[in-house]
Structure formats: C-alpha cells, structure tokens
Amino acid sequence: MADAALHSEARLTFRVRYVDCDPMGFMHHSHYLPMFEMGRTELLRQTGISYRELEARDVLFTVTKIALNFKKPAHYDDELELLTRIVRQTHVRIEHAYEIYHAATRQLLCTGESTIACINKKGEVQAIPAFLGGQG
Amino acid sequence: MADAALHSEARLTFRVRYVDCDPMGFMHHSHYLPMFEMGRTELLRQTGISYRELEARDVLFTVTKIALNFKKPAHYDDELELLTRIVRQTHVRIEHAYEIYHAATRQLLCTGESTIACINKKGEVQAIPAFLGGQG
Amino acid sequence: MADAALHSEARLTFRVRYVDCDPMGFMHHSHYLPMFEMGRTELLRQTGISYRELEARDVLFTVTKIALNFKKPAHYDDELELLTRIVRQTHVRIEHAYEIYHAATRQLLCTGESTIACINKKGEVQAIPAFLGGQG
Amino acid sequence: MADAALHSEARLTFRVRYVDCDPMGFMHHSHYLPMFEMGRTELLRQTGISYRELEARDVLFTVTKIALNFKKPAHYDDELELLTRIVRQTHVRIEHAYEIYHAATRQLLCTGESTIACINKKGEVQAIPAFLGGQG
C-alpha cells in the first residue's frame, strides 16, 4: 500500500453516552467496537473515499479478528479520543491498531487490534483494489 | 385481514441483559424497541411465514410511528414477558400493541403501540400482499 | 421554570454509524432514542449543569413516555442534526420535543416527544429542584 | 477452583435480532460480546449463584481482555448456540472460552476468549471469594 496510508492516523473524539454505560457506571466493553469501526471509516475518508462509496463499487470489508485490552474504565459523559492506524496490509487483509484515551487526563483506557478482509456482496474474499493501495 | 390473525397474540420471554442496563440499574428505555420488533416477528412466524422470507419476496415493513409508556423499570436479569397483538390493518399499514410484564410478579412494566408500513426494497410504499391478509 | 430555559434549544450533529444500520440500509428506529437522550443532556449542559452532577446530587430523571414519528429513513454515514427543546415543565416532569434533520438536504426525518420525571436513587418521584427552575 | 466448575459448560441459544444485523445482512461483530456475557452469567447461575447476588455482596467482575475470531457470518433470524466454559482461574482473574455455532447447520461461526477480574464497587481489584472457588 501507499506509504502515506501506512503512516496516516485518524483522530476522533466521542462523548460517552448514558445508554452505553452499565450498572457499574462504566461504558460497557462491547461499545468500544463501534468506535473502532468509526475510526476505520475516518481513516478511509482521509484517503478521499467513503466506505459508502466502496459499498457502491462492491468492495466491502468484514472483521475477521478483533482483540481488546481494557486498562481503565470510561464513564458517562467522559470525552474520549480514539487513534486509529493501519499496521499492516496484505493482498486481501488490513490490520488496524487502536488506542482510546480519556481526553482530559490523557490516560490510556483501551487498546485494540483488528483484521478486516476484503469481500464482495456475495461474501467472497477478493483482492483489495488498487485505489486502496492493493493489487486488485 | 383474516380474523385469525387479528385475534392472535404472540408471547415471548426475555432475560434482561447486563449490557442493556444503565447506571441507574434500569434496562434503558431504548431497548424495549428491539423486543417489540421480535414480538412482531414472532406473531408473523405463527402465521407460518418468516420475515426473512418476506424480504426475499421484496415485502418489507418499516416503522412509521411508535410510542411507549413506562410504568415500572426492569432490572438486570429480570425475566420479562412480552405480549404482541395486531390491533388494526389497513391497505398498507399494520398497527400493533405491546405489553411487557415482569414474569415473576406479573407487574405491567411497559405498554407500546406502533404502526408499520409495507414497502419494497426501493423504499416505495406497496399494498400488503394477500397472503398476509392484505389486498395486494 | 426560567423563561430562558423554556425558550432555549440544543443543536447536536451525529454521523450515522454502520453498527446502527439494519439490512434495509436504514438507521434502525431504536437508535433515535439515544440521540434524543444526548439532546436532553446537551440542553442541560447549556444551563450550566451536567447530568453527571445531577446524579451526584441524587437528582435523576427517568423517561415515562416517549413517541416517535418517522418520515424518511436515515442511511449509513449521513450527517444528522438534532434539535431538542423543552415544551412544558411541571412540578416533577419535563416534556421535550425533538426534530431530526438530514444535515445536507435539510429534510425532516423524524420528530419525537418525551416526558421525563424527576426521581431519587431509590426510584421515588421528587420535585424538580429550584436550580433547574423547579420548586423543589 | 472446584473441579466441577472448571469442567462445567453453559449452553445458551439466541435468535439473531433484526436490530443486530448490518447493511451486509450480517450480525454486527460487536453483538457477540453481550452473548458472551450472557454465557458467563449462565455458567455462574449453574453454580447456584446469580451475578445480581454477587453485586449485592460487592463482588463485581470487569472484562480486562477479550478477543474474537470470526469464521462465518450469522444472519437475521438464525438460531445460534453458544458454549461457554472456564479455562483458567487465578487469585483474581477468570478466563473463559466461547464457541458460537449455527444451530441448524452446526457450523462454527465464532470463537472467543476473555479475562475478567474481580473488583469491588470502588473499582479496586479483590480476591475471588471462596464460594466462587477462590481464596478470598
């Protein structure tokens, strides 16, 4: 893939929603995954293309692996900052890494990594197209 | 619509999930809506057809109105019972009513009503087909 | 309540998340409710107090009624604008009204109204405190 | 921990909800995590204690690590079967493993593993109590 993409990074901020917090008062661990997904979308948008446009061209991505490490809990109304970057790209797969910080204290709350695979609407794996730095 | 369908009723039970409870310890009010949706799906299944089959025939339903009244909160791990029934059917719309009870105490926790409209995959309103008691 | 609060209005923008869209490609109707909740939180913040601070003072609000009307669907990656305002305040209750627009086209997608009641941590109804324009 | 607990296994079935499926028609990957959580709850219930009772005794568990591998997608209205078991227990941590199968075809859709840590309501790590097979 293009060096530019490999070294780029997306920053997004989120306000923790009441609906996403559990009886312990913590943001439930499952709600970090949609944040990661928005990070990937934003990183893609920075390269000048939206995921919505990709879908129109029959280029979809599906998550094949994801892992999270939780260091400190996030609480209701906290402002969080997410950093997303690409760590590796192969013929059909892209690996991302994620860090979520508490915006005010700069404490690291959560890290993650994922692998997504390029598929078409029928669910068949396909090569990542050239305009995304792939060989397809 | 067929009298049978008009008078039928679906019963479903749910266990309140931890992820659906908020810092007050209550099931968040937004999580009643997916339960209502499962009630409609179950009512349909009782008539011998699944919503998945409907989608394959280009018969979709979209919610146009929904209202909820909350009487008592549901808590984590409570078992809830949902009653769903059709209260009215027109050329393109079906109106449902819902009641959610705390299974152990029989207390009524929440009531609701909704209107769904029959559309195709392009999002255009269409008549409810004859096999669903409609005139389309 | 203070006239200022009665006439104030909160504006928030949201990007429709992939996770919130259903197989029809529409944002699922249940996901409007957390947006409304964020609208109420933002309106409160404009009066100089956060809901988190209210909780610390044992002033909680619970939704007792909510109704939604859907006019047009929202799609993945759409930018939405939510307007939230207070329409009525009684001794223990506040009624809000909501409008959600597609930011780019200015089309009205959804309207809603809700009633919230002031409670304490034990779940008992209490008067809205004076610093929120109430008599408690 | 007691051998019985180490070798026990919880089985739960789930119907994939419409609200949990994305525009690809797949159950969104984030929705596997609440299933895993219900698996842990069920496994605990089999030992004769509910997580709700644990909370009342100030024994809480927080997820510190979780990882998922997706093999095949789940679709709307599919019936899924989840197997949950404990693979390791230390002084303050429990590790679980998960497998999700498509109930009708017996295809393995997803595997996962997680680590949870025992904490109190203040968020401090504490030893797992003796009645849960711990030394605390």
Image (spheres, coloured by chain):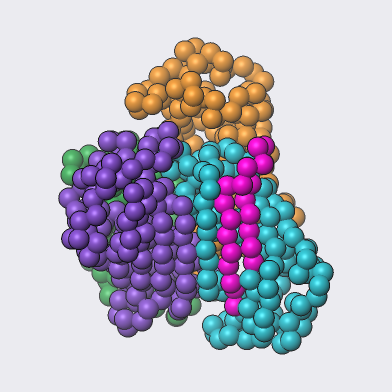
Chain colours: A orange, B purple, C cyan, D green
Does D48 sit left or right of A82 as displayed?
left
Q: Residue at x 66, y 52 (%)?
A: C82
Q: Residue at x 60, y 59 (%)?
A: C36
The verdict on residue A126 being magenta is no
The quadrant the C terminus of chain D occupies is: bottom left
x and y percentages locating residue C108 in the rendered image? 61, 47
Q: Residue at x 62, y 16 (%)?
A: A2
**Would you place residue D94 above or below residue A39 in this image?**
below
**Would you place residue B48 above or below residue A126 in this image?**
below
Residues rendered magenta in the picture: C96-117
x and y percentages locating residue A124 in the rendered image? 35, 23
Which quadrant holds residue C132? bottom right
Nearer to us in this view, A64 or C128: C128
Does B61 sit left or right of C128 as displayed?
left
The quadrant the N terminus of chain D occupies is: bottom left
x and y percentages locating residue B71 in the rendered image? 46, 78
The secondary structure that dominates the magenta segment is strand
Nearer to us in this view, B135 or D26: B135
The verdict on residue C104 being magenta is yes
Q: Residue at x 72, y 87 (%)?
A: C136
Can see residue D133? no
**Would you place residue B86 above or below residue B108 in this image?**
above
Which quadrant holds residue B3? bottom left
